Each structure stands twice: as structure tokens, then as C-alpha cells.
């Protein structure tokens, strides 16, 4: 069901400063930027590698407001790893399979994600304390 690690999401206070840190330290390049109002984030995708099933990225996340998932996370835990996102070929199918194991889905239907992906979150309390995201990339020619 899981094809790859699509991205690791990292919460930060200052997106531009954190992009600069990742560029300087690891040489990673920004390939996409987006404001996602529904998720309450301004985000940047930094390309890490390409594989047979698609790319892998670091996703840097700055909250749009304090009262958002990333804003609350920063207030209580500070900057750091916020979520792990797995690439899947069929996000709705993966959600059904995972829900059947007893893990709670935060999203009942897939949402809009970065770079026109379809995403869904699993509750961290049911995944060993790790906020987990499923990502279905759009068709390659879209
Ligand atoms: C909260 N908790 C976490 C966590 N955030 N645990 C691990 N990793 C995280 N990132 C824990 C928190 O410590 C509490 O544990 C408990 O969950 C409840 O937290 P809370 O602060 O009261 O917050 P809630 O319950 O209001 O919301 C938590 C959830 C929320 C996970 C439900 O953050 C959510 O819906 N997240 C999914 C959406 C999201 O994160 N969007 C931003 C990324 P204790 O203290 O009770 O033990 S958007 C994105 O990735 C995009 C667009 C993309 O990839 O394309
Ligand atoms: Co993400």
C-alpha cells in the first residue's frame, strides 16, 4: 500500500529563514510554494530525491495563524518534525484499509495537498504519537 516516504513536514516560525537554513546546510532546493488556507499553512517543498514511484521532499510549514494545527504545535512543542507523509497510489483506498485496522482518520475524505496532491491525516494518538499523512500524487501529465 505504501510506496515511499513522500515528505517529512517540519514546523517553523519563519519559513524564509528555514528555507535558507536547509539550502545552506543541505543544498536542498525549493520546487514549490503554496498557501493552503484550509490547512492553515504557508509551505515550501524542498526536493530530496526521485524514485520509481515519485519524489520525496522536505515540507517546511509556517502557520497562517496561531489557532491552526501548526500554530498550536509550535506553541506547545516548538519547532521540529510535525508529520510523516507516505506516498500511496490510491488515497481513498488506503484510508479505508487503515481505518479497518482501528486507526482514526482525521479526514473523512481526501483534501487538497501540496502540488495538487490528495491528502488525508491519521490521528497521532493511534500511530504511536506520530501525525501521519497519506499522499496521492496527481497524474504525471497534470
Ligand atoms: C498534536 N499532537 C501531535 C501533533 N499535533 N502529536 C504528534 N504530532 C503532531 N503534529 C498531539 C498533542 O500533543 C496532544 O497530545 C493531542 O495531539 C491533541 O493536540 P492539540 O494540540 O489539542 O490539537 P488538536 O487535537 O486540536 O489537533 C491535533 C490534530 C490536528 C493532530 C488533530 O493538528 C490536525 O487535524 N492535524 C492535521 C492537519 C494538519 O496538521 N495540517 C497541517 C499540515 P496530548 O497533549 O493530549 O498528549 S498541512 C500539509 O501537510 C499539507 C497541506 C501537505 O502535505 O500538502
Ligand atoms: Co504534509
Image: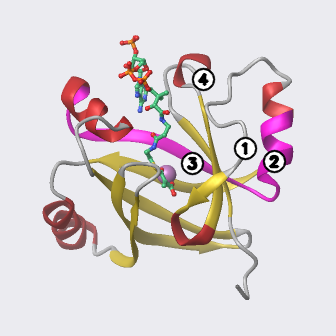
Instruction: Give the spatial CA distance, label 1 vs label 2.
Output: 7 Å
Q: Pinpoint residue 91: horizontal percent, then vertical percent.
A: 77, 51
Which quadrant of the view contains residue 72?
Answer: top left
Residue carrying label 4 = 127
User: Counting other residues with Cα less than 10 Å from the Cα at mark 1, is it few (<14), some (14-19), or many (20 or more)?
Assistant: few
Which quadrant of the view contains residue 123?
Answer: top right
Near-viewer residue (50 or 71):
71
User: Counting other residues with Cα less than 10 Å from the Cα at mark 3, is it few (<14), some (14-19), or many (20 or more)?
Assistant: many
Name the mark nearer the viewer: 1 or 4. 1
Q: Which mark is residue 85?
A: 3
Q: Regarding mark 3 in the picture, which secondary structure is present there?
A: strand
Residue 74, compared with residue 18, is above or below; it is above
Question: Disc 1 or 2, which lies upstream in sequence?
Answer: 2
Q: How many numbered circles does the render carry?
A: 4
Name the mark nearer the viewer: 4 or 2. 2
Q: Which mark is residue 92?
A: 2
Question: Disc 3 or 2, which lies upstream in sequence?
Answer: 3
Instruction: Give the spatial CA distance, label 4 vs label 2.
Output: 18 Å
The range drawn in magenta is: 77-96
Question: Disc 3 or 1, which lies upstream in sequence?
Answer: 3
Instruction: Give the spatial CA distance, label 3 vs label 2.
Output: 15 Å
The reply to whether dot 1 and dot 2 touch (C-beta < 8 Å) is yes
The reply to whether dot 3 and dot 2 touch (C-beta < 8 Å) is no
Residue carrying label 1 = 109
Amino acid at each position: 500500500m505504501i510506496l515511499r516516504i513522500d515528505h517529512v513536514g517540519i514546523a517553523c516560525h519563519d519559513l524564509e529563514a528555514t528555507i535558507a537554513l536547509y539550502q545552506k546546510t543541505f543544498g536542498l532546493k525549493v520546487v514549490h510554494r503554496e498557501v493552503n488556507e484550509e490547512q492553515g499553512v504557508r509551505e515550501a517543498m524542498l526536493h530530496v530525491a526521485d524514485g520509481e514511484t515519485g519524489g520525496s521532499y522536505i515540507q517546511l510549514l509556517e502557520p497562517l495563524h496561531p489557532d491552526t494545527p501548526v500554530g498550536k504545535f509550535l506553541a506547545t512543542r516548538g519547532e521540529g518534525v510535525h508529520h510523516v507523509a507516505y506516498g500511496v497510489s490510491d488515497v481513498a483506498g488506503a484510508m479505508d484499509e487503515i481505518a479497518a485496522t482501528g486507526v482514526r482518520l482525521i479526514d473523512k475524505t481526501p483534501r487538497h495537498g501540496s502540488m495538487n496532491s490528495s491528502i488525508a491525516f491519521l490521528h497521532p494518538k493511534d500511530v504511536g504519537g506520530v501525525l501521519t499523512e497519506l499522499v496521492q500524487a496527481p497524474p504525471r501529465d497534470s
